[in-house]
Image: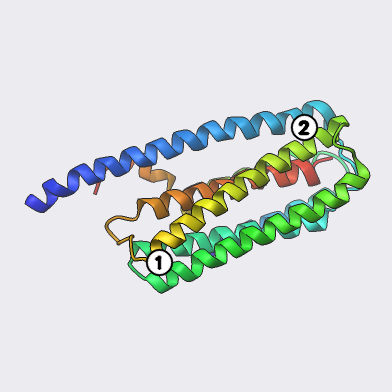
């Protein structure tokens, strides 16, 4: 649920930035997208299973 | 001890399954990266003003919500809660279908503003089309998992098809996290 809430907030922030700031939105939007992607890979996709020792 | 010895081949097979799926996902990121970078090559930091940004935000939220229900379905399968597993998987498929309806609406609007034969039109329809194809294939996989799961095929000890199908679905969401700002916001 936290990932969904953070992702939605991040999308709204990206949307607001794109419609209010005239120039230089690429970097903040790219950073927000990378944070979203990292959250999805870490929480939803369990990427750490790849290098975590077997239980 | 005998149980642990029996479980070991299963565990190493699971690790191989996961590694194989991640390698496939990484190869898919190259495809999307190439398409995304070509958008910047063609248009730089500008974009057509006719794109429906609100619709883009709406379908992005729908896809993100579908990842949440997919995650809940996976957790339900891991803990053997079959009704919750089926309910969440159905919700995921419904949200995925809703996303496709949104893309269809965006396409019908986009055809009026930029023809597929123009440079941006080619990029827009290729990028959203390739992604929509991934959504459709993800829906097919989830439907197969659902119908197999209905007969009680998956147990908390053995539910790799559920995990694999849902990981693929999350990847479809992850790809859109970059496609949405690239097409609709930057510029």
Question: Which is more N-terminal, label 1 or label 2?
Answer: 2
Q: CA distance from mark 2 to mark 1?
A: 43 Å
Disc 1 target residue: B150
User: Is B180 in front, or is A30?
Assistant: B180
Q: Nearer the viewer, mark 2 or mark 1?
A: 1
Position of residue B58 relative to residue B186, above or below, is: below
Disc 2 target residue: B39
Chain for mark 2?
B
Name the residue: 54% across, 52% down. B140
User: Is B11 in front, or is B185?
Assistant: B11
Q: Position of residue A21 (x, y in %)?
A: 85, 47
Within 10 Å of disc 1 (Cα), the crowding (few <14, some 14-19, many 20+) is some
Q: Position of residue A53 (x, y in %)?
A: 27, 42
Can residue B101 be seen?
A: yes
Which type of secondary structure does the marked residue at label 2 adopt? Answer: helix
Q: Quadrant of residue B94?
A: bottom right
Name the residue: 75% across, 41% down. B182
Q: Position of residue B65 (x, y in %)?
A: 60, 62
């Amino acid at each position: 649920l936290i990932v969904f809430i953070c992702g939605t907030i991040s999308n709204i922030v990206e949307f607001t930035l794109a419609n209010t700031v005239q120039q230089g939105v690429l970097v903040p939007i790219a950073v927000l997208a990378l944070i979203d992607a990292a959250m999805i890979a870490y929480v939803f996709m369990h990427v750490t299973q790849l290098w975590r020792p077997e239980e | 001890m005998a149980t642990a010895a029996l479980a070991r081949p299963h565990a190493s097979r699971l690790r191989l399954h996961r590694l194989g799926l991640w390698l496939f996902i990484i190869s898919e990121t190259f495809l999307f990266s190439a398409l995304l970078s070509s958008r910047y090559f063609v248009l730089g930091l500008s974009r057509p003003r006719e794109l429906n940004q609100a619709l883009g935000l709406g379908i992005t939220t729908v896809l993100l919500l579908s990842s949440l229900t997919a995650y809940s379905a996976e957790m339900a399968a891991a803990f053997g809660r079959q009704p919750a597993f089926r309910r969440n998987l159905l919700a995921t498929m419904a949200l995925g279908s809703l996303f496709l309806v949104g893309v269809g609406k965006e396409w019908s609007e986009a055809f009026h503003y930029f023809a597929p034969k123009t440079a941006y039109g080619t990029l827009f329809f290729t990028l959203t089309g390739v992604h929509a194809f991934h959504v459709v294939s993800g829906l097919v996989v989830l439907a197969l998992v659902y119908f197999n799961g209905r007969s009680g095929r998956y147990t908390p000890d053995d539910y790799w098809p559920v995990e694999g199908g849902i990981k693929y679905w999350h990847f479809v969401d992850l790809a859109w996290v970059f496609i949405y700002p690239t097409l609709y916001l930057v510029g």
